[in-house]
Image: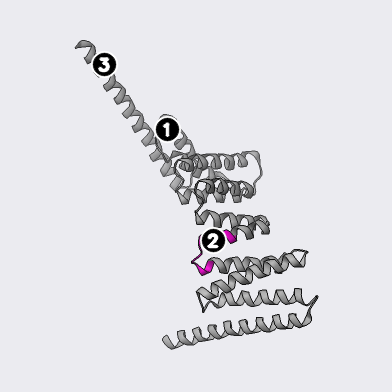
Amino acid sequence: MKRMLCLLGALTLSLGLLGCEKIKARSEIKTANEAYQKEDYANALAHYVRARQIDPSFPDLDRMIGYSQIGLYVPDDKSPKNEAHADAAIAELTRYLRKRPDDRIARDALINTYLNANRTSQAIDYFRNYLNQHPADLDAVKSIATLYAKQGNFNESLNWYQKITLLDSKNPEAFYVYGVVCYEKVAKNPPADDNEKMTIIQKGKGALQHAIDMKPDYFESMAYLNLLWRQQALVDAKTDPVKAQQDVAQADTIRNKAIGIINAKKAAAKKAG
């Protein structure tokens, strides 16, 4: 009985110490939160780190340490000290997101840190790894498409925008965006080979027409379809001037239809107002 009482006493003491540690950690977190609200990120960071040292069981400490490091980071400052803040922010948020992968706000903060630190390739790698576990995550696919475009890799960007149309096949905007990207490619950064250029034009036209089929008054899609027909005319003019004239006539027809829809919408809005 005496031995049992001693064991119970030791357990009670242990639990008491454990509770005391949690109280200390909460006090540090409270102080850190107050500093963070005042944008005193250095002080906030020190208290969040101390709280984690006292009690690492609080799940959001990795996130808040990461946010504090972001607060201390200055974009375009390439000094080792500043780059260390970016490194630490990325490490902390990556650790946190392994535990809570559905926290979109934290994920956006991580991606913005990658971009502000000119680490676009790392951002792409993060999303590609994420998609291995979540292959149908539309937002992640959109992010990769955007990141490749930002990187200037238009071919990869086109591939990922096409994936969006597969995942979001009932949304006309997905096809519209893909068509716009096709136009941007052939108009601003065209491939040297005309056959390759024509392939992109046909893909873009098909996507834009599909968007119009789903949404008949989609005048924005018509505007870009018109532009792609004109790009096709530039290619056809090299070998078949008559075909090029037909392309331009088709572009004019689509443009005029878009203008008619716009005017009808304006008239309806004016009448309703």
Distance from the alpha carbon under mark 1 to that under mark 2: 42 Å
Q: Which residues are magenta?
A: 161-173
Query: Depth-wise, is mark 3 or mark 2 nearer the camera?
Result: 2
Marks 3 and 2: CB-CB under 8 Å? no
Name the image quarter holding the C terminus: bottom left
Q: Can see residue 77? A: yes
Left or right? Give the position of 22 relative to 221: left
Distance from the alpha carbon under mark 1 to that under mark 3: 27 Å
Name the image quarter holding the N terminus: top left
Q: Mark on residue 56?
A: 1
Q: Which quadrant of the view contains residue 228?
A: bottom right
Alpha-carbon neighbours of circle 3 within 10 Å: few (<14), some, or many (≥20)?
few
Q: Residue at x 61, y 85 (%)?
A: 256
Quick one: SS at disc 3?
helix
Quick one: SS at disc 2?
helix
Q: Tell me where residue 243 appears, x and y as whole percent.
A: 74, 80
Q: Along the line of sight, which residue is nearer the eye, 94 or 37?
A: 94
- The amino acid at mark 3 is Leu
Marks 1 and 2: CB-CB under 8 Å? no
Alpha-carbon neighbours of circle 2 within 10 Å: few (<14), some, or many (≥20)?
some
> Mark 3 or mark 2: which comes first in sequence?
3
Q: Mark on residue 166?
A: 2
Image: 6 above or below 144: above
- The amino acid at mark 1 is Pro
- The amino acid at mark 2 is Leu
Q: Along the line of sight, which residue is nearer the eye, 168 or 27?
A: 168
On whether residue 172 falls in the magenta region, the answer is yes
Quick one: SS at disc 1?
loop
Q: Which residue is mark 3?
A: 7
Which is the main secondary structure of the residues drawn in magenta? helix
> Mark 1 or mark 2: which comes first in sequence?
1
Q: Residue at x 55, y 57 (%)?
A: 142
